[in-house]
């Protein structure tokens, strides 16, 4: 009767994968990524979990007669940083899930991988 040993081994392996996923998720939350727009006129820094930690706007990006362009730059820099966070999550999580990430990138305002971070 090798079945109980097989089940114990399966449980042990599942626990190892879960621990590795938790470690990868913590690393993501601690890692910072940066997105830029307008030739680095606007820079957004966020964690791998999509929490914005810094926004930098160079003075030459500010034109009081054209606030809409500045808003567009901020949004573009955010989207760039968010894309970087999604790529980072894919790099960290996909190897642990055998590449199974659901095949979807997170959308704007969503945490990568359906919020598992």
Image (cartoon, rainbow, N blue to C red):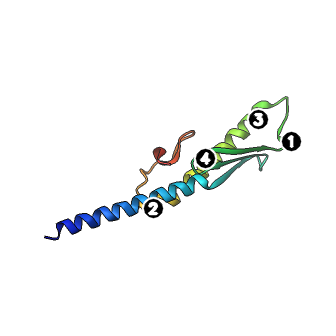
Is residue 95 shown left or right of residue 80?
left
Q: Which residue lies at the image location 43% right of the left edge and 60% below the top edge?
A: 19
Judge depth for marks 4 and 3 and give the one in front. Answer: 4
Of helix, strand and loop, which one carries label 4? helix
Q: Which residue lies at the image location 40% right of the left edge and 56% below the top edge?
A: 100
Between the C-alphas of marks 3 and 2, the distance is: 43 Å
Q: On screen, 13 above or below 29?
A: below
Of helix, strand and loop, which one carries label 2? helix
How many residues crowd mark 3 within 10 Å: few (<14), some (14–19), many (20+)? some
Judge depth for marks 4 and 2 and give the one in front. Answer: 2
Q: Is residue 28 visible?
A: yes
Do the numbered discs 2 and 1 sit on residues whose CB atoms are within 8 Å? Answer: no
The residue indicated by pointer 2 is 20
Judge depth for marks 3 and 2 and give the one in front. Answer: 2
- Count of labels shown? 4
3 or 2: tag closer to the N-terminus: 2
4 or 2: tag closer to the N-terminus: 2
Q: Residue furthest left?
A: 1
Of helix, strand and loop, which one carries label 3? helix
1 or 3: tag closer to the N-terminus: 1
Do the numbered discs 4 and 2 sit on residues whose CB atoms are within 8 Å? Answer: no
Q: Position of residue 26 (x, y in %)?
A: 54, 55
Judge depth for marks 2 and 1 and give the one in front. Answer: 2
The residue indicated by pointer 4 is 82
Between the C-alphas of marks 4 and 2, the distance is: 23 Å
The residue indicated by pointer 3 is 69
Q: Which residue lies at the image location 28% right of the left edge and 64% below the top edge?
A: 10
* Disc marking residue 67: none
Q: Nearer the viewer, residue 60 or 3?
A: 3
The residue indicated by pointer 1 is 59
Q: Position of residue 87 (x, y in %)?
A: 56, 55
Q: Which residue lies at the image location 51% right of the left edge and 54% below the top edge?
A: 25
């Amino acid at each position: 009767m090798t079945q109980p040993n097989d089940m114990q081994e399966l449980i042990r392996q599942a626990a190892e994968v879960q621990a590795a996923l938790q470690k990868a998720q913590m690393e993501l939350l601690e890692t910072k990524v940066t997105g830029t727009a307008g030739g680095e006129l606007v820079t957004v820094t966020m964690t791998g979990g999509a929490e914005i930690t810094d926004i930098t706007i160079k003075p030459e990006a500010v034109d009081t007669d054209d606030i809409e362009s500045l808003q567009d730059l901020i949004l573009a820099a955010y989207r760039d940083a968010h894309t970087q966070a999604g790529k980072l999550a894919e790099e960290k999580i996909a190897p642990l899930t055998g590449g199974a990430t659901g095949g979807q990138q997170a959308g704007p305002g969503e945490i990568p991988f359906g919020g598992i971070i």
